[in-house]
Image (cartoon, helix red, strand yellow):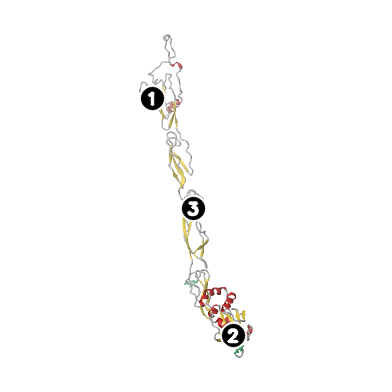
Amino acid sequence: MPTNRCVAAAAAAFILFFFSAGATTDYDSYSDFIEEDDTPQLDYKDPNWCRSPHLPNGEVSCRSPRGGAHRGLLGTRCEMTCDRGYRLLGRKSIQCLANRLWSGSAYCRRVRCHVLPLIPQGRYSCTQGFFVDSRCEFTCRPGYRIEGEHSRTCLHRGSWSGVQPECSDTDPPKIRCPLSRLKVAEPGKLTARVSWDPPAATDTADKFLNVMLVDQQPGSEFKEGLHVIRYKVYDQARNRAACKFIVRVEVRRCPELPPPLHGYLICSSDGNNYGAECEYLCDGGYERKGMSSRVCQFNRSWSGGPAECVPMEFKFSVQTVGALLDQFYEKRRLLIMSAPNISDPDYQLQNIMIQKSDCGLDLRHVTVVELLGSPPRETGRIKENLLQSDVIEGLRQAFRISRFYFSMVLLDKLGIDRERFIVPVSSEELFSYIDSFLMEEEERERLELHRDFCD
Ligand SMILES: *[C@@H]1O[C@H](CO)[C@@H](O)[C@H](O)[C@H]1NC(C)=O
Ligand SMILES: *[C@@H]1O[C@H](CO)[C@@H](O)[C@H](O)[C@H]1NC(C)=O
């Protein structure tokens, strides 16, 4: 359309003209004589009195005094309107004047909306840039969602419809916990050390996430039972995700071991858990027959077999004091009581005082040896068992026990004389001495348990 373009250029160059002051004509008495040569010859019929008006991107609608399609007649008035998306600059209405020019000029300028700002974490694309009717569509980065209107349109007045939307992170992060696990407590323990790889979290929006462990750390000791391990994670928009798994610690246990008749067990750890060891011990007057201890194995059975406590058996008819003492070594304490004769008052008093104390003596692993009289009618006995005279003589010499006055010697389990009494003592005094100075820790505990048993 080369002609159109040419006309457009001409129309844009419309220039406003004014009539000269002489537009009004004064008629007076002299007028008949004055010939006004410069008065234009007005021709109301010339269709090209003014050049036909043109408005690019707009419309010109004219009304001429003579009607019809004539747009250049003198006196024609034209209304200028711009196409959608254009704004009129200049005169809205022009008239074809006597000087063959139009009374004003106008042109249509394309309307633009302002440049749309970007939104954080998002972008937009527009159908026709920032011109009228252009629709700009907003989109968000992955992991974000539009909040508000998805698009804005450039309105014909040059402003955008709506308000800027926002991109907000609504996708929670993802986190996956390790599998639940079962761990058997370590031997001799009621706990197990359990480890795992901490879970990694991902989020569409954030790269760096802070994964928090709510419970026990991996690699720490866990008690018997179920433990729920929880992890949680927040992204920067405080969307939360969590996961959990279970750590189960099993303590393997053997059946409870029954204590032996006339004896007891001392067990390590929890008594019957995997790795616990139980030692068989016998009451005073009894000795162990069989394995000294058993261990609870992984397959929940005890190693070995049960031990028994059988009554201690001593041979009293031995020929030497050594043979007698060897039998008591590490098993029994000896209380050797000596008196000149059976009617010795101290001896009698002592007998009264420790009468009925057999139980207490047994509890303290004490065997009483009595040496009475002088040769040839000298006797030595342990309860009703008589000792050989060489043995009696041996005891007297080894522990310096006189035949001529009442005395008592207390030997410990290693056969060493620990205390000597030359006057009768009550059983309480005797026991208190033994408890304080001769008892081993374990015996003392055992004694505490059975103290009432003798009453
Ligand atoms: C348990 O395991 C031990 C070896 O560790 C084995 O000697 C014993 O026979 C097993 N007992 C049972 C009941 O499986
Ligand atoms: C018993 O011993 C005492 C001394 O302790 C003595 O006086 C008494 O005569 C003795 N009795 C007998 C019957 O030997």
Q: Secondary structure at mark 2?
A: helix
Q: Does dot 1 land on a helix, a strand or a loop?
A: strand
Label 2 CB, ligand 2: below 8 Å?
yes
Which quadrant, please, contains the N terminus? top left
Q: Nearer the viewer, mark 3 or mark 1?
A: 3
Q: How many marks?
A: 3
Residue 222's disc is: none
Residue 375 is situated, as x and y percent measured from the top left of the image, at: 61, 90
The answer to whether residue 307 is visible is no
Between residue 69 and residue 233, name the one nearer to us. Answer: 233
Q: Amino acid at mark 2?
A: Pro
Which badge, 1 or 2, comes first in the chain's sequence? 1
Q: Is 92 situated above or below 199?
A: above
Residue 233: assigned label: 3
Q: Is residue 70 left or right of residue 253?
A: left
Distance from disc 3 to disc 1, alpha carbons, whole Å, reads: 73 Å
Callout 2 environment at 10 Å: few (<14), some (14 to 19), or many (20+)? few
Q: Which residue is mark 2?
A: 345
The answer to whether residue 410 is seen in the rendering is: yes
The image quadrant of residue 434 is bottom right
Callout 3–callout 1 Cβ contact below 8 Å: no
Residue type marked 3? Val
Residue 61 horizontal/vertical position (percent)? 38, 26
Pointer 3: residues within 10 angstroms few (<14), some, or many (20+)?
many
Q: Earlier in the sequence, mark 2 or mark 3?
A: 3
Is label 1 or label 2 in front?
Answer: 2
Residue at the spot of label 1: 62
Mark 1: amino acid: Cys
